């Protein structure tokens, strides 16, 4: 396969700014081979994130990615502490008020329609790279890496099942069979040409613009859309992908024991073979200073 250009993309917001700054520092230290790192933020956060920009890092406001009729507003039900994405145009299109996680997914889907790199690798703002990682390793002669966990979604997983059903319906595919493959993970890579084709198929199937078609559903998964498209509407080989169930990032979730991080001297012993990053969810309560210390210890 000829050399393909790679962009890293990170949706973020003001509450995760310091974690995003740590992610950027870790990318600058450990990641090589990418053409650009895009930070996808709400317009009102543009000034806050602007200092993170550089020769290979751009901060892109949401207004450059999503239509004007969908924008964020203070949520009156939370006395303005949270935001909702809505507006007269959205309501006229039958789109219920969306939350931040909906908007972040839409930004990720929109980026390949605006950027020009061949591959987009998504890195969440609560991740930290801890080992050298050349993004060229995503590409082989038979295609680009796609995270795929066989049988990862069962019928009993109600929320995930709903994501599968929405993806199948909007892509015009048969109802999903379970167990289904799972395409949701950290450090997931997409091909830009597939995203363009996927968006066109959604618009053809639904006879709506893609943002309206997707956002009309309260529950959806950008990764399931892409996985179902490249494997269900095409084939992995035709879509230029090879499947890999290995997790490149070790994630500390809220239900894991993270108390050991307090006495940990380095993340190195925590990483498994082939893992290059960790993700520590913000709601675990691990102090950011502790994460910086562990990063500097690498």
Image (cartoon, helix red, strand yellow):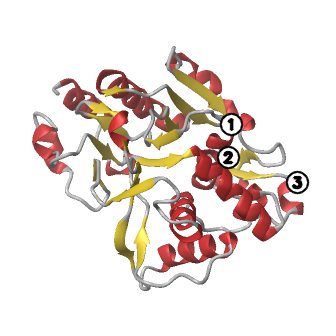
Closer to the camera in the image, 78 or 280: 280
Closer to the camera in the image, 80 or 275: 275
Q: Nearer the viewer, mark 1 or mark 3?
A: 1
* Residue that carries the numbered disc 1 in the rendered image: 114
Query: Visible in this render: residue 11?
Result: no
Instruction: Give coordinates of residue 159: x percent, y percent.
Output: 50, 75
Query: Visible in this render: residue 209?
Result: yes
For this view, does 164 lie left or right of residue 286?
A: right
Q: Secondary structure at mark 3?
A: helix
Which residue occupies 63% across, 22% down?
Answer: 47
- Looking at marks 1 and 3 on the same chain, the residue that comes earlier in the sequence is marked by 3
Q: Report, in whole angstroms, how far the alpha carbon at label 1 lies from the one at label 3.
A: 22 Å
Q: Nearer the viewer, mark 2 or mark 1?
A: 1
- Looking at marks 2 and 3 on the same chain, the residue that comes earlier in the sequence is marked by 2
* Residue that carries the numbered disc 2 in the rendered image: 80
Q: Quadrant of the rendered structure where residue 263 is? A: top left
């Amino acid at each position: 396969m000829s050399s393909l250009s790679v962009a890293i993309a990170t949706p973020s917001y003001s509450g995760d700014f310091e974690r995003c700054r740590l992610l950027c520092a870790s990318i600058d230290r450990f990641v090589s081979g990418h053409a650009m790192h895009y930070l996808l933020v709400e317009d009102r956060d543009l000034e806050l994130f602007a200092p993170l920009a550089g020769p290979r890092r751009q901060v892109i406001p949401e207004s450059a990615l999503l239509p004007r009729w969908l924008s964020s507003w203070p949520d009156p039900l939370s006395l303005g502490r949270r935001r909702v994405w809505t507006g007269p145009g959205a309501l006229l299109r039958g789109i219920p008020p969306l939350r931040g996680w909906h908007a972040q997914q839409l930004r990720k889907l929109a980026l390949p329609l605006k950027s020009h790199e061949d591959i987009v690798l998504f890195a969440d703002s609560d991740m930290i790279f801890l080992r050298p990682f050349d993004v060229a390793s995503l590409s082989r002669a038979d295609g680009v890496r796609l995270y795929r966990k066989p049988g990862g979604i069962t019928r009993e997983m109600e929320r995930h099942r709903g994501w599968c059903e929405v993806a199948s319906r909007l892509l015009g595919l048969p109802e999903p069979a379970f167990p289904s493959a799972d395409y949701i993970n950290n450090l997931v890579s997409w091909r830009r040409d597939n995203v363009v084709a996927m968006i066109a198929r959604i618009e053809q199937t639904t006879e709506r613009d893609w943002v309206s078609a997707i956002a009309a559903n309260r529950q959806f998964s950008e990764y399931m859309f892409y996985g179902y498209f490249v494997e269900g509407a095409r084939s992995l080989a035709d879509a230029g992908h090879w499947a890999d169930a290995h997790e490149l990032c070790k994630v500390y979730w809220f239900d894991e024991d993270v108390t050991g991080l307090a006495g940990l001297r380095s993340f190195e012993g925590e990483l498994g073979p082939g893992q290059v990053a960790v993700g520590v969810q913000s709601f675990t309560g691990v102090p950011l200073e502790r994460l910086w210390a562990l990063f500097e210890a690498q």
